[in-house]
Image: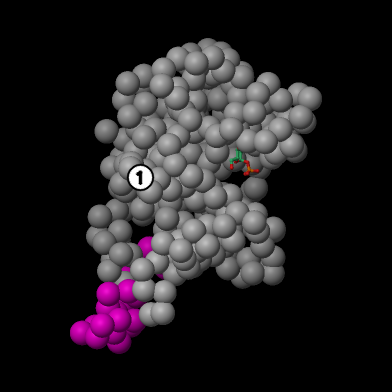
Amino acid sequence: MIKKCVFPAAGYGTRFLPATKAMPKEMLPILDKPLIQYGVEEAMAAGMTDIGIITGRSKRAVEDHFDISYELEHQISGTPKEAYLAGIRQIIDKCTFSYTRQIEMRGLGHAILTAQTLVGNEPFGVILADDLCINDSGEGIMQQMVRVYEKYRCSVVAIEEVAADEVHKYGVIDASPLDDNVFKVNGMVEKPSQEEAPSNLAIIGRYILTPEIFDIIRRTPAGKGGELQITDALQTQARENMVLAYRFQGQRFDCGSMPGFVQATNHFYNRLENKDD
Ligand code: G1P
C-alpha cells in the first residue's frame, strides 16, 4: 500500500499575479474549494493519507487550511453553515499533514528531493495541484495509477495526448505500448520544441515514484531552464531500471493557466445541483 503523497507547493504562481502575491496559488479556488484540496481528495481516494507538502515562503494559508479553525467552528456550530466545513473536516480527520520548506526554487526534481525526509524509503505519490484531474465515471487518476504500480512495482507517470504545438509546455515521452493504456518509457525530454519532441504524449502532474529516485535526482545535473528536472531523473531510472507511463481515464484541467482554470470552474459549476444557494 502506498500511504504517502507529496505535493510540491513552493512555486510563486507568477501567472496568476497579483492574485498570488500574498496567497499561495494552491489556494486559488475552483468554486468553493482550493486547488490543493481537490488534489488531497484524489490522494485520499487512492488510500494515500500521509500528505507531505513542500512549501515555501508565504504559504501559511495552506497549513491553516488543513487545520481546525476553532473560532470559526465555534461560531457556526449548531447552525446549517456547519455543513460547509464537513468535507474539509473529514480530510483533517483521516489524513496527517507534514510540511517541509524548499529553501531555494531549483525545480521540480529539487522539490521532490526535499521531500525525502518526509517520505523515507517507500514508494510515494506526487500530485501537482494545478493539474486538476477528475474522472466523473469511475476511479480517480491516482487510484488508477496505484493499480499500475501494484502490477509492475516501478515508477509510473501519468500521460495525456496533447496537440503538437503544446508539447513545449511538458515533459514528453518516447515509449512502447506494454499493456492497456500502459507504455514502457524509452526516453523522455523536458519541454522539447515541436521538432525535438519524440511523441505527443505529455507527462501531466501525477507520479508514483520508487524511493531510488532520490539518489538518482542527487546525481542529476541541472537541465532545462537551469533547474533540476524530475523528467531527467526519470529518464535515468527508465534506462537503468524501468519507468512506465499510464494514459489515464478522465479529464485534466491545466489550472496553472487562465483558460484551464476557467474551464475547470465551468465544469464544476455545471455539475452543481443547487446553483442558486
Ligand atoms: C512540470 C514538469 C513537466 C510536466 C508538467 C505537468 O512542469 O516539469 O515535465 O509535464 O509539470 O504539469 P511545470 O508545469 O511545472 O512547468
Question: The N terminus appears in which quarter of the rendering?
Answer: top left
Q: What residue type is labelled 1?
A: Ser
Q: Residues within 10 Å of mark 1 (few under 14, many from 20)?
A: few
Q: Is residue 78 above or below residue 63?
A: below
| Image quarter of residue 161 | top right
Determine the residue positioned at 41% across, 21% down: 180
**Residue 160 percent location from the top left of the image:** 55, 34
Say whether residue 54 is visible.
no
Magenta-drawn stretch contains 68: yes
Q: Which residue lies furthest to the left in this view?
A: 78
Front in this rendered view, residue 59 or 189: 189
**Residue 106 percent location from the top left of the image:** 66, 42
Q: In this view, does 24 lie above or below 230?
A: below
Q: Which element is circle 1 on?
A: loop
The quadrant of the rendered image in which ligand 1 is seen is: top right
Front in this rendered view, residue 115 or 61: 61
Q: Is residue 274 above or below residue 121?
A: below
**Residue 179 percent location from the top left of the image:** 41, 17
Magenta-drawn stretch contains 25: no
Q: In this view, does 7 lie to the left or right of 1?
A: right
Q: Is residue 195 left or right of residue 104?
A: right
Q: Name the residue under label 1.
A: 137
**Residue 274 percent location from the top left of the image:** 36, 73
Q: What stretch is highlighted in magenta?
A: 63-84
Say whether residue 214 is visible.
yes
Q: Is residue 90 left or right of residue 137?
A: left
Question: The C terminus appears in which quarter of the rendering?
Answer: bottom left
| Image quarter of residue 220 | top right
Determine the residue positioned at 40% across, 66% down: 272
What main secondary structure does the magenta stretch of the protein show?
A: helix
